[in-house]
Image (cartoon, rainbow, N blue to C red):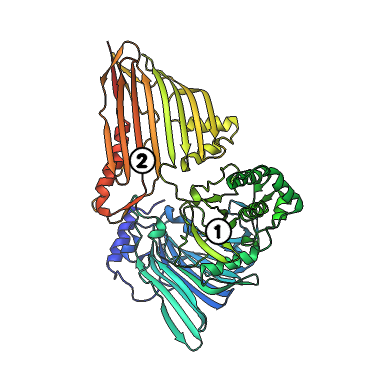
Amino acid sequence: MKITLRAIFAVLILLLLQSFERAEAGIKKDDIAITAIPLQLILGADAVVREDVRLLEYQRPGRARMEVRKVITILNSSGRDHGDISLFYNQFSDVSRISGAIYDSSGEQIRRFRNRDAEDRQAFDGISIIQDSRVKTLEMFHSSYPYTIELEYRVDYTGFINLPAFMPQSQNTSVQYSRYEISMPADQNLDYKAINFEQNDPEITRDGNLKKMVWEIRNAPKVKRERFGPAWNNLLPYVLVRSDDFNMDRNTGSLRSWEDFGMWMHDLWDGRNEISDETRQEVAFITEGYEDPHDIIRVIYRYIQNHTRYVSIQLGIGGFQTETAEQTQRNRYGDCKALTNLMHGMLTAAGIESYPALIRSGSRGVVTSPDFVFNSFNHTVVFIPLEQDTVWVETTSSNFPPGYIGSGNANRYALVFNENGGTLVKTPDYKPRDNFQLREATVHLQADGSATAGIQTRYGGARHERIRNFTRLASGPLNRALYDDISLSRFEMNNHEVGAALLEPEAWINLDLDISSYARSMGNRLFFNPNMLASNRGQVAETQERTQAIHQNNSYYDVDEFTYHIPEGYRIETLPGNVILDESFGYFETEYIVDEDSGTLTFRRTLKLIPEILPPEEFGTFRNFVNSIPRHDSAQVVLVKG
């Protein structure tokens, strides 16, 4: 349910009578009505953060307390999730003193919430089958928009590495007032990094033995993201905070440098990669006769894939400390740390130098950078430095080839750690030609518009990951996946073959299709699109003024070649012209080749996209390139009889 036009008009009239800026910090408990929100904060937003005050008392490494008060006005159904409260805690933290309320648009209280109203249950992250995290939840919803929720709670921390980050604004929300205040003993030092924040440095005050750091944000409208603009973590403001020293479960460490943090990790893992005599004999057996280290890595990795399975386990300090290699071998399962550690131990037994590496996997979250030491990691992989090259291994994958780390781990910093501490190392960056799709097809057109097609497609790099997963599907799900993958309306799949290379990041699909209605018949003419498997791409709309840089993040290389056998008695009447679009960020080409002797038409299509950040003034060039591709992809060939 959205706000009605009449309600919006009434609110705007009242707001126009107010000042757009409020002098006081935050809002008073008796001033929650929507009419107290500045106009510019309502327009375009799904919710308005009226007040978000976080008071963190940092006592010493591993000890802190945070008091939180939040008041959020939810304007429409798209902002409803702000009322779905989830407060996570574990053995190193405790959430208490929960209270809250719901208010209608005029500020009248509808319902109160107490600590006993919060449901307390085990947390589930969708991955881990064993973990000690719990969550207290409140559903603070009202049937009529807009409404306001108020929430207060306290968190006591007894172990941590980073301090809670300050993230005052999320997508499609505006902020009336938000404050992050950290108090600490004057002799303690906290380091910080502000991203996309006008107030880079906090306001710092001292009072005797107490020091305070304060960040504030006031009257911030919804952050807009233009299409193909920067990622949200490059637009929304946030502040990362850490102490020089930390304590987790009586394990003290330092974040003064990446070397120091890596040393802490090494100490947690030290000696835990020792394998049993039985496993050592197994390593000797499976590597017998191999001298090339790549072959040794391959057979050990294949052993890990065939004899263990990935199970996420997050218990206490075990979220950082690995299980022993011997225990993982006995269990035949483990999380990313345990499987990495087991392979590390087996490689050591085979005489291959290797190290565990922490990484931030996936496309979301804080980006690891050399200039600020901060624990943003959520995954572990194996780093193997060889004389001629470097091999990375993703042990949680049961079907990746050795040396392929996966697109979710590519082109980012990993923290490799050993007895000398930690070092940031960049993971492989897969270029367009690594992420390829190469397709060849032979199509026999019939006079009634039907066709038979034999299609062979090879995939590489990031493009091959989904197809490699197809190879693990049973016949029923595989058939459904293939049918869903083919952009044709009426066809039957007579035969198919799906496979993946053992040693390379490549996969393939071979198809034989009967297409009952491919060419459109009108009188003595046939019309058809030679790009048989073209996927529909949306158009990029024209914009009045582009303010954000264009982030062209795609990196792939496609080549399609379709050879059409023209029906007997027909000839080509109309043929689209050849096209070449050549820009720094991409290349597109189509070519039509007629062979009258064989009665064939060959259509060749090439598309290469290169990651690049373009200035806003080049949006027109970028838009024309992107919009031209589906237009040329839908071009028609006309055959005429006689």
The three-letter amino acid code for the residue at tag 1 is: Leu
The kind of residue on which mark 2 rests is Lys
Depth check, front residue: 229 or 72: 229
User: Which numbered dot is residue 137?
Assistant: none
Q: Which residue is at the far right?
A: 278
- Report which quarter residue 498 is drawn in: top right
> Quick check: 377 left or right of 169?
right
Q: Distance between the residues labelled 2 and 1?
A: 32 Å
Furthest-bottom residue in this view: 208
Q: Name the residue under label 2.
A: 608
**Residue 548, percent from left and from top:** 30, 56
For residue 3, say whether it is visible.
Answer: yes
Q: Residue at x 56, y 56 (%)?
A: 379
Residue 317 lies, in percent from the top left, at 64, 64
Secondary structure at numbered mark 1: strand
Q: Where is residue 10 in the image (x, y as percent from the top left)?
A: 31, 60
Residue at horizontal 60 percent and vertical 32 percent from the top: 474
User: For numbered disc 2, what is the local secondary structure?
Assistant: strand
Residue at 57% x, 49% y is: 394
Q: Between 82 and 109, which is closer to the camera in this rendering? A: 82
Q: In this view, does 601 lie above or below 273?
A: above
Rendering quarter of residue 76 = bottom left
Q: Report crowding for label 1: few under 14, some 14 to 19, many 20 or more residues within 10 A (C-alpha).
A: many
Label at residue 358 = 1
Task: Name above or below for residue 588 compared with residue 76.
Answer: above
Residue 541 seen in the current view? no
Depth check: 233 or 379 in front?
379
